[in-house]
Image (cartoon, coloured by chain):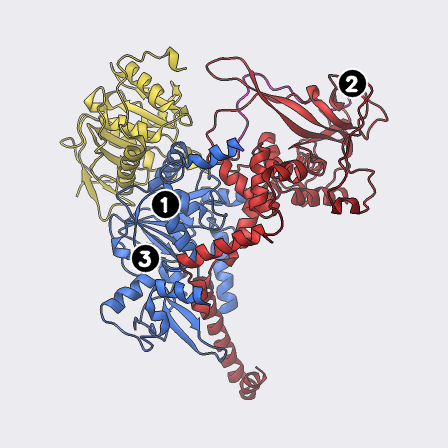
Chain colours: A red, B blue, C yellow
Amino acid sequence: MAYVSVKGGERAISNAHQWLDEMRRGDASVPELTVEQIRHQMSLAVDRVMMEGSCYDPELAALAIKQARGDVTEAIFLVRAYRTTLQRFGATEPIKTPEMAVQRRVSAAFKDIPGGQILGPTFDYTHRLLNFDLCDAGPAGVAVKATEPVVEKMPTIASVFAHESLLEQTAAESDDAPEPYDLTREPMAFPAGRDQRLQALARGDEGFLLSLAYASQRGWGSTHPLCGEIRMGDVTVEFTPEELGFPIEIGEIVVTECQMISNFEGSADKPPQFTFGYGLTFGHNERKAMSMAIVDRALRHKEVGENGVHAVQDEEFVLYHSDNVEASGFVQHLKLPHYVDFQAQLQFVRRLCKEWREAREAATPDAGEFAEAAE
Amino acid sequence: MTTQTNRMQHGAYNHAYLDEQTKRMIRRAILKAVAIPGYQVPFGSREMPVPYGWGTGGIQVTASIIGQDDVYKCIDQGADDTTNAVSIRRFFARVADVATTERTAEATIIQTRHRIPEAPLKEGQIMVYQVPQPEPLRGLEPRETETRAMHAYEEYGLQYLSLYESVAAFGRIAGGAGYPVLVDERYLMSPSPIPKFDNPKLHQSEALHLFGAGREKRIYAVPPHTDVRSLDFEDYPFDVQSWDEVCALCGCPDSYKDEVILDDEGTRMFVCSDSSHCSDRRDAGHAGPMAGHELDQGSADAANLEDAE
Amino acid sequence: MIGSLALEGVSPGFANPVADSQRVFRRVLDAMSRPGRLIDLDSGIAAASPHLTAASALALTLLDFETPVFVALDADGEAFANWLRFHCGCPITAEPKAAAYALVLADLLPALDQFYAGDPKYPDRATTLIVVCAALEGGAAVRLEGPGIAETRRIAPAGLPEDFWNQVRADRSAFQLGVDIILTAGDQIIALPRSTRIVPEN
C-alpha cells in the first residue's frame, strides 16, 4: 500500500493533527501545564526561544514551548512564523549595557574590576547532583539579600582599558548612522557587515555556535580567547517615534552580554593590542553569548590580518548554516515525497547496471551468469 | 492571559497571508526576474508558517500574485492529492478565499513541486515552482560569492566540464532531475528538481513560469515564448526519460510515470505521475491494463483507505 | 512627516488597496511577460491628471519606503511628489542614478544612461523607468523581439524623444545590465524590459 500511504487526503492530515494534539497533552489525569508555569519555571528555555525566535516576548515563547511539546527548535519556528506577521514600527535606540541593572557580572581577566564581581544566579559551582527534593513540590528557594546596593553604573571591560589603548577602540556610531542590516527583511549578502553578522549569530543555533566556538578553541580557528566580561541584567529599551523626535522608554528587557578578549600582535598600522569578539542574547544565556563572541572574533580574522583557513573563519559557511529554522526545514523536507526524482535516478542506475552486465558478459562470457547467480 | 486571548481573537491575517509591503517587495522582485530571464533575484524572503524546504518560496510567490479571480491548482510530484499539495492548497483556499481545482486546463495559477503538468500550458496560466536550491552551480561550487561571479561574467565552463566528466564516466550525461538549462542563451538556470522529461515544456512555453526559493531567498522567471535549452553536446544530445510500460490505469504511453511497488516479490505497476492528466484520460474512456485497480478510485477514496488503516 | 505635507488637493488612491493593487500588479506582470503588448490597467483610480492614471496606479502598486523615486513631471510635478509621499511613503531623490524607480514625462526624459543599469552581479538593482507618453499608438513604429514575444511585435508609442530608440538599442547592448521601461498613457501601459531587443523594420 505504499502508494496510498504517501497520497493522503485532507482527512488524513486533520486526523494526524488531532493525534498530535492528544500526544501533546499526554496523560489527561496529570494536570495540564500552564503557559505561566512554563514562563516562570522553564525560564531559560523561554530565553532561548525568544533569542533564536528573534522576538522578546516571554509569554509567546512559553506558549510556543507548550505547543511544541518542549521541542525548542520547533518552538523557535513557531515564534518566528508569528513574528513575521507583526507590523514593524522601526528600530529602537541602541541599548546601553553600561547602564544595565546588573544581576550577574564576572570577568576572568582581572581579580577585581570597578563595580565588582557579582556571581548572581548561575549553575557555575553547583554540584550537578540530582536534587530529589524536586520530585515533589520542592522547597521555594529564597535569595539572600545583599547588604549594599550594586553600583548604578558599571564600566565595561573596554572602558577599563580605554586610557591605556591596549584594547581596540571601535568608532562610536554617529546618531545618523543608517539603520542596521535586518536579515528578516533582506537576504544574506557577502561580504557581510558586522551588523549583519552579529544579527545572524544572535539568531543562530546555540548548538551550532557552541560547536564552532569549541572547535576554534581546540585549534580549528586561531582565536585564543579569554572571557573579558560577562554581564546579565535589565536594560531599558528606548524608541524615537518619528512624530515626537525624542526617545521614549518602551520597556525593559533582560540581556546577557559577553566580551571575549584575544590578543593581536600588531601590524604596520596598528600597535599590538587586544581585540575582542562580541556576544549578546536575550534573557540569560551565557553559553550562547560566549560562543557567539568567540565566533564573531574568529570571523574578524581579515580585519586583524590572520589567515582564515578554518571553517569557523569562513563567513559564508558560518552565516549560511547557523539558522536552525532553515536547517531543520531543509533537512526534514527529505521526508516529502521525492519519487519523481527517484524514478529518474532508478531509470539511470538500471540502465547503467544493464550496460555494466552486458559489458561483463561480452568480455568474459561466464562472468555475467556468475553475477546473476550471486544476486 | 488577556493579551494572549486578544492575540488569538484577532484572526487578522491579510488577504493571502502576507502583509501588503511584503507583497510589494516580492512583486518588485518578480518583475525584475521577468525582465532578466533566468537570473536569480535576491529578495527579503519572510518566515512562513510552513517549514523551509516545504514550499516557502512558492507560497510567497503565489501569495503575492493571487487574487479573487484566480483558480488555484497545487501539485506535488505531479499529483493534486499528495499530502503537502493538499496542505498548501488548503492554506490558500483559507487565506486567499480562492477557487481551487485539480484540472490543469481550469487553473490560472499552478503551484508545483517537481513536475510540469502533461497538458500543454496556455496563455494566461502562471506556473509557480517550489525551489529547494536555485543555484544550478551549487553542487559544483559551494560559495555564493563565486557562483554569483560566474553568472555575472557568463563563465559556465565548470558546468560543461562536469557534463563532460559525466560522459566520460557513464557514456552519457548523468542527471535525471534538476537538469540545468540556458535561458535565452544567457543565464544558466536550475529548472528546480523537475525530471528532465519536463525540461522541453519550458522552451517557448505559452505560460509564464515563476520560481521561488524561500530558504535561499531567490526568485527567478522564464517568460512565455523564451528559449530554454537543456545543456548538451553535439555528439551527446539531450534526451528525456521514456518507459516501455504504458500507464496501468489510463494506458497513456508517453507520460512521466510513477513506479508503484505492489508486493514483496518485485511486482510493480507504472502509473501517470500527473494525476489530473490520468483522470482526464480515464474520463475520456481510456483504460490501461490494470484499469479498475483500487488506485483507480480518486483521492477521496484514497484518503478513506488510509483512515481505515 | 505627514503634517508637513500640503494635503489639500491630494487625490485619493485605490478604493480597495489589497484587491486593486493585486489586479494592477497582475496586469503589469502580464505586460512585462509580453513586452510590447498594449495592456489596459483598469486601475479604477481618479488621478488628478488623467494622463497620469497608469503612472499613479503603478506607484500605488509598486512603491513604498524601500524604493527611492526620481520624479520629472512638468507643472504637475510638485503636486505629484506630494501625492507620492502621502500614498506610498517613498523617498524622492533628485539623482536619477539613486532611483529604484523613475517617473518621468516623455518630454523631460533624461538620457537613459543617466539611470542605474545595475551591477553585473546584481543586475536587478537597476532603475525601473515609468515614462508618461502622449499616446501609446500613432507614433513612429519600431519592431521588437526577445523573451515574451513569439515572433516579433510592432509598437508605435507617440511623443518620445527623437533618439529614444537609439538609446534603447545602446542600453540593450549591455544586457544583463539595463533599465526596464514601462511606457504609460492614460490608464494603459506597454512594457519594455531590458531583455527586449529593437529589430530593424521588415
In the rendered structure, which amino acid carries the disc numbered 1? Answer: Arg
Please give the residue where the numbered disc 3 appears in the rendered image.
B201
Q: Give the range drawn in magenta.
A: A164-182
* Magenta stretch: dominant secondary structure: loop
Taking A170 as reference, is A239 left or right? left
Q: Which of marks 3 and 1 is nearer the N terminus?
A: 1
Please give the residue where the numbered disc 1 appears in the rendered image.
B94
Distance of label 2 from label 3 (alpha carbons): 75 Å
Q: Is mark 2 on a helix, strand or loop?
A: loop
Q: Is residue A367 above or below residue C166?
A: below
Q: Which residue: 60% across, 54% down?
A: A27
Q: Which residue: 29% across, 18% down?
A: C80
Q: What element carries label 3?
A: helix
User: Are the residues at dot 2 and dot 3 in contact (C-beta closer than 8 Å)?
Assistant: no
Q: Which chain carries label 3?
A: B
Q: Which chain carries label 2?
A: A
Please give the residue where the numbered disc 2 appears in the rendered image.
A149
